[in-house]
Amino acid sequence: MTEHKNLRMVRQAHHPSNHPERSRGAYELTNYNGVIERYKQYLPVTDKTPIITLKEGNTPLIYANYLSKLMGRNFEVYLKYEGLNPTGSFKDRGMTMAISKACEERVTAVMCASTGNTSASAAAYAAKAGIKCIVLIPAGAIALGKLSQALIHGAVVLAVDGNFDAALDLAREITNKYPITLVNSLNPYRIEGQKTASFEICDTLGKAPDFQVMPVGNAGNITAYWKGYKEYKEKGKINKLPLMLGFQAELAAPIVRGYPIKNPRTIATAIRIGNPASWKQAEKARDESGGLIDMVSDKQIIEAYKLLAAKEGVFVEPASAASVAGLLKLARKKYFNLRTCKLANLRTKIVCILTGHGLKDPDRAIKSIKEPRLVKANLKAVLKEIGY
């Protein structure tokens, strides 16, 4: 009886009536060819721009059953799962634009400083375009999965004896003096490509969310999302803007603390940045939207990381989980209840941005779980362990 009851509960949770985004018709595409082709009317491209694409974008906006129930009545939580981009992170949206424009300008080499995801994306898109990619990484501070991607795509990878900020300073100096294009988020085309994720969210929901919660590292992504939402509103595609809620790691939170962090520390390597390149733009997104930028501890990040995998079936890298850790932190403070309409027929929509796939940092997953139990190779031993 208990199993039948549980099965009914699962079916009910996944019934179409419990997924409002389905009834509005999530945007489904045939012959999809990437974000530039889909949103070219909003992007600085022309017929002369060679489109370098791996068919990035069009990532799922997943209704989060567990988190929605945890938030309480009249809340809908969605997960924008950017880990399903071609190289496993949101960086591909910006890189298709940056590399396409570099090719339009007949550039033969690109360069970036990276904590991991940018290097993987730059290397893949440069390989697709047939141009050279040079990557500067902070020595000993990059997840194995990301480093392997950059190397397998043929990038020239150099480990700098310093943190990310030192690597970025070097990349900026070199690209200013030599015929090499910088493809970090300081490159405006990166922001242009990354803003397409906000378009997708609105196209799926039929409106902008009430709140968007996301990790903040170098701060280019929160800048891009806010730019996208504002442009969609200007074009009449949506009639309101979301509150932008960003979260940094507690020991790598320069925006929250108000000063650069010389030696940022966090297990979330993708946001281990002490002096964000888009600092001012992130503050602008926060202030214009009426939102906030706060911080979460590594303990809170790991708790959210495990929760997403165990309760929502979504495997992310630790930095991605900072968004859900932030959601839970604000929920405990009743932040959302104080800022939402209490009318029974209005449901508050919250979108959490999950920036990268869990396979980006497999070592963290292994450290966060128990090893499999060893059992004898017989039926009785196995049945005993599984409770039958």
Image (spheres, helix red, strand yellow):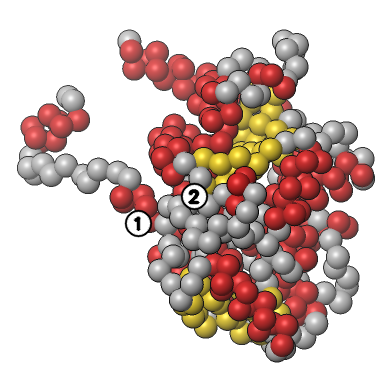
Q: Residue at x 61, y 15 (%)?
A: 73
Residue 359, x across and y down, in percent:
43, 55
276 and 222: which is toward the camera: 276
Spatial separation of the CA atoms under disc 1 and disc 2:
21 Å
Q: Nearer the viewer, mark 1 or mark 2?
A: 2
Kindly state the secondary structure of the residue where label 2 is placed. Answer: loop
Residue ranking furthest to the front: 259
- Decide: marks 1, 2 in contact (CB < 8 A)? no
Quarter of the view holding residue 179: bottom right
Q: Can you say which quadrant of the picture contains the C terminus?
A: top left
Query: Is residue 343 in view from this perspective?
Result: yes
Can you tell which mark lies on residue 363? 1
Q: Can you say which quadrant of the picture contains the N terminus?
A: top left
281 and 356: which is toward the camera: 281
Residue 41, x across and y down, in percent:
88, 58
Between discs 1 and 2, the one toward the N terminus: 2
Q: Amino acid at mark 1?
A: Asp
In this picture, residue 163 sits left or right of residue 31: left
- Mark 1 Cα within 10 Å, few/some/many (few <14, many 20+)? few
Q: Residue at x 81, y 56 (%)?
A: 39
In the image, residue 39 above or below residue 383: below
In the image, residue 282 above or below residue 205: below
Q: Residue at x 75, y 11 (%)?
A: 343
Q: Residue at x 72, y 22 (%)?
A: 339
Q: Amino acid at mark 2?
A: Leu
- Mark 2 Cα within 10 Å, few/some/many (few <14, many 20+)? many
Kindly state the secondary structure of the residue where label 1 is placed. Answer: helix
For disc 2, the marked residue is 251
Quarter of the view holding residue 126: bottom right
Residue 239, x across and y down, in percent:
88, 34
Residue 109, x across and y down, in percent:
66, 85
